[in-house]
Image (cartoon, rainbow, N blue to C red):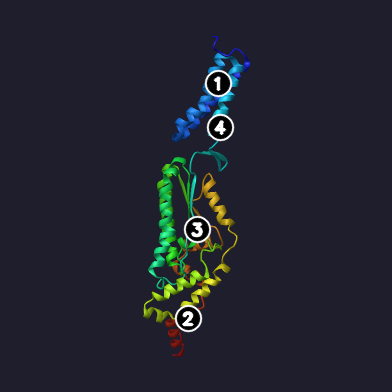
Amino acid sequence: MDALPSSPLGWLCTGVTLLFGVTVLCMAKRSPVEKADVLVWRLLPALLGLLCAATLGAGGGLVVFCAVCLVSSAYLGVRALLPVGDKAVLITGLWGVVNNAGILGIPADAELLPMSTYRRCMEVNFFGAVEVSKIFLPLLRKSQGRLVNVSSMAGGIPLPRYAAYGASKAALSMFSGVMRQELSKWGIKVAAIHPSGFRTGIQGTSDLWDKQIKELMENLPADTRQDYGEDYLLGLKSYFLHMPAYCNADLSPVLSAVLHALLAKRPHGLYTPGKGAYMSLCIFCYFPLWFYDFFISKMLSTESLPRALRTSEAESKNL
C-alpha cells in the first residue's frame, strides 16, 4: 500500500504517465516499422515516471519524468515533422522523390528525327526516372512516402512534332500509373504531373538547336530530304524561336501541383497544371479521334508545308 501515490499530485502524475503510455502504444500500432524504437524512447519516460512516483513520491516522480522526456526529445529532435494534410507526420528518412529531369530534343516530324534523338529522350526522360525511382524505393517503403514524376501534356495526348519527347513522357506516365497501383500496398502514393507549356528553357540554346538541325539533315535519306525540302527543314528553327512566346513564364501552377502531391493527405494520381492541359486531355479521351485531330491541327497550325505537298497542291489547282 505504501507504493501507491498518497497525494492528489501523485495521482495526477500517475494518470499523466498512464495516458502517455497508452497514446504511445496506439502510435506504435499504427507505425509497425518503427515499433521497437517508439516503445523504447516513448514509453521510457512513462515507465520511469510511474516507478519514481511509486518509490520517490509525487515530486520525485514528476522531476524524473520531465528529465527523461527531455532526453528522449533530444534523441528524436533530429527527425522532422512534415505537415501532411492537416496532420504532422514524423519522418525518419526519405519522404519524397520528384523526377523532374527532361530533355526535349528537336521538335520535328517523326520521320525526320534521327534515332539518336529517340534514344536520348528515352534515356533521360524515361530510363533516368525509372532508375532513380528504383534506387530510392527501399527508403520510400520505410517512410511510406511519395513518388512524383513530372511527365508532360505530350505524355498524355499525341502532339505533332513531339514524337520522341512524347513517347518518352508517355512511357513515364504509364510507369507512374503502374507504380501507383503496385506501391499502394506499401503505403506509398504515386503521382504523375502533366504540365502544358511552361518557359523552363527545355528547348535549349540556339547553338544546340543548330547542332541538332545539322545532325538531322546529315542523317536524312536523299529522297526524304527532297520531298520535305530544305526550306521546310530550316523553317523548324523559326518554330523553335517562337516556342517561348506560347509558354507560360509563371511556374507556380506546376510547383503547387508538386507540393500537393508531396504533402496532401490524399494526393491526386494525375495533375494537369497549365493552360489547356486538362481540356486537351478531355477532348482526346471523350471525343472522336477525328475531332481531336482537327482541334490539334487548328491549335498547332503551321504555315509551311513540305515541298512535295506544295508541288502537288499547286498542280491540282492548275488542273
Residue at 44 percent across and 87 percent down: it is 316
Q: Work out whether residue 263 can be spotted.
A: yes
What SS does tag 1 mark? helix
Left or right, residue 151 beside residue 63: left
Q: Quadrant of residue 18?
A: top right
Foreground: disc 4 or disc 2: 4
Instruction: Tell me which amino acid carries mark 4.
Output: Ala
Q: Residue at 54% of width from left, 19% of height from top?
A: 50
Q: Earlier in the sequence, mark 1 or mark 4?
A: 1
Q: Position of residue 46 (x, y in %)?
A: 53, 23
Task: Categorize mark 2 by other alpha carbons within 10 Å: few (<14), some (14-19), many (20+).
Answer: few
Which amino acid does the dot numbered 3 rest on?
His
Residue 156 shows in this picture: no
Asked which secondary structure carries label 3, the reply is loop
Look at the image and tell me in which quarter the N terminus lies: top right
**On screen, residue 190 above or below 238:** above
Question: Which residue shows up at 42% across the image and 46% down it?
Answer: 137
Q: Is residue 122 left or right of residue 238?
A: left
Earlier residue among tags 2 and 3: 3
The alpha-carbon separation of the residues under discs 2 and 3 comes to 33 Å
* Nearer to me, 286 or 179: 179
- At a point 55% along the width and 17% down the height, the residue shown is 52
Question: How dense is the environment of label 1, judged by Cα within 10 Å: few (below 14), some, or many (20 and up)?
Answer: many
Q: Who comes first in sequence, dot 3 or dot 1?
A: 1
Q: Which residue has dot 3 on it?
A: 194
The span from disc 1 to disc 2 (Cα, nearest Å) is 85 Å
* Label 1 or label 2, whichever comes before in sequence order: 1
Judge by depth and name the residue closer to the eye, 178 or 99. Answer: 99
Residue placed under numbered mark 4 in the picture: 74
Q: Secondary structure at mark 2?
A: helix
